Image (tube, rainbow, N blue to C red):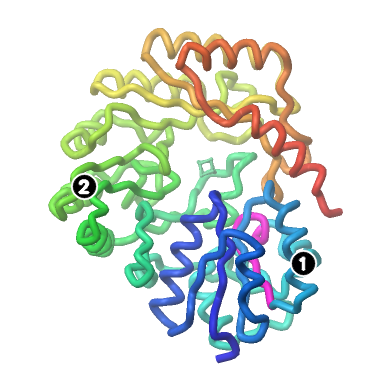
Amino acid sequence: MEFQRILFRTNKHNRYSITALVGAILSRIDIDVIESKSISDILQYPVEGTVVAYSFMSFDIDIVKVEVQELKKHGYIIIAGGPHATALPQETLKIGFDYVFTGDGEENIVRFLLGERPENRIFDGISKRINLDEYPAICEKKKLFMPLEISRGCPFNCGYCQTPRLAGKIVRHRSIEQIVEYEKISVKYGKTIARFITPNAFGYGSKNGVTPNLEAIDELLYKVKATGVTEIYFGTFPSDVRPESVTDEVLKIIKKYVNHDYIVIGAQSGSNRILEKIQRGHTVEKVEEALEILAQNGFYAKVDFIFGFPFETKEDVEETFKFIEKIVKKYNAKIHAHTFMPLPGTPLWNVGPGILKNYHYKFLGTLASQGILDGYWTKQEELARKVVSQKIE
Ligand code: SF4
């Protein structure tokens, strides 16, 4: 084999995807897999026999560019995958990467390490998707135990989100048998809190990824519980729930197993005009309906909202503020606020960065000081500007 080692450049945004890739590689190939937290760490390894792998978000592009230049000076082979590389493969090659991986990376990174080299230097993981059951969700050899990815892909097309392009529009589910197997291994190593990665937790096992498959969810949680886990989180970070997937039946099922009394719901706006423009596929009324069903079942909601869309009017924002005030009062909702970031490959890529006005700061700041609201909305305003300023034409 050409390489003796593969170094993954880790940061706080890519832990989950790197775990999946490390697990995939070590399930097929005998090679040194090393996680490097910094470029100086990478530079300690010889150029000969080393490939350096990046998986990064668009807002990390400035740091990545600088590091790639430095690594190329030394002569390293460098590869890239993840949301940014999937959205802009040619541009990612131009930065200096030798090969780019779009979409699902597991099968293609193995092929690369075994010597496959596509002429256009782009490994296509979009038209050829993997079966989740063929690749591990954790890496026992490296003791990497992340929340288990139970579903991948999303049938929606929210204008700001890279997931449908990165993970595909067809939802694929990992089998219950496999999830339980990985949970058992995790428990063996003392990891007894079960968390899951999925674009919509209540869509697990569902053909369309939206209508809850009650039997599948019940069986999944029952069997996960039986592995000896002490706590189960389902419908909370790092997964959330679509409002239309919240039903009385599904809540009655999960209530038997979970250790939380809230569910994370994506609402994104209190204005139907904005919901339509960002292609959310649901209305404000649907969000309220979900909160009502949650309340009837003893759950409250942590609700995601995005602010600062360049096309949002003061009236849209006022409607959202009013809706927030209503759901905080009526349903005891907590708010998770984001600032819009235009990401490459998404329908809203070209509309400009999210901008917060004084009235946003005033309203969001007040709720934050009352402990009702959290989120990285101020940081994201900076990141939104950064992403746009780094656009490669
Ligand atoms: S925001 Fe959620 S529902 Fe919308 S496209 Fe992304 S993953 Fe799917």
Start-end of magenta stretch = 77-86
Percent x, y of residue 152: 44, 55
Instruction: Describe residue 106's horizontal placement relative to residue 117 as left or right.
Output: left
The residue at which mark 2 appears reads as 221
Mark seen at residue 378: none
> Can residue 176 be seen here?
no
Percent x, y of residue 5: 54, 80
Quadrant in which residue 2 is drawn:
bottom right
Q: Estimate how packed mark 2 is, as few (under 14), some (14 to 19) or many (20 or more) residues with alpha carbons within 10 Å.
A: many
Percent x, y of residue 101: 62, 69
Residue in the image at 65% along x and 64% along y: 40
Mark 2: C-beta under 8 Å from nearest atom of ligand 1: no
> Can residue 119 be seen here?
yes
Q: Amino acid at mark 1?
A: Glu
Q: Which residue is at the front of the view, 31 or 116? A: 31
Q: Estimate how packed mark 1 is, as few (under 14), some (14 to 19) or many (20 or more) residues with alpha carbons within 10 Å.
A: some
Residue in the image at 52% along x and 57% along y: 167
The residue at which mark 1 appears reads as 70
Q: Amino acid at mark 2?
A: Leu
Choose the circle earlier in sequence order: 2 or 1.
Answer: 1
Residue in the image at 80% along x and 66% along y: 94
Q: Secondary structure at mark 1?
A: helix
Question: Is 355 drawn above or below residue 105 in the view shown?
Answer: above
- Does the magenta segment cover residue 187? no
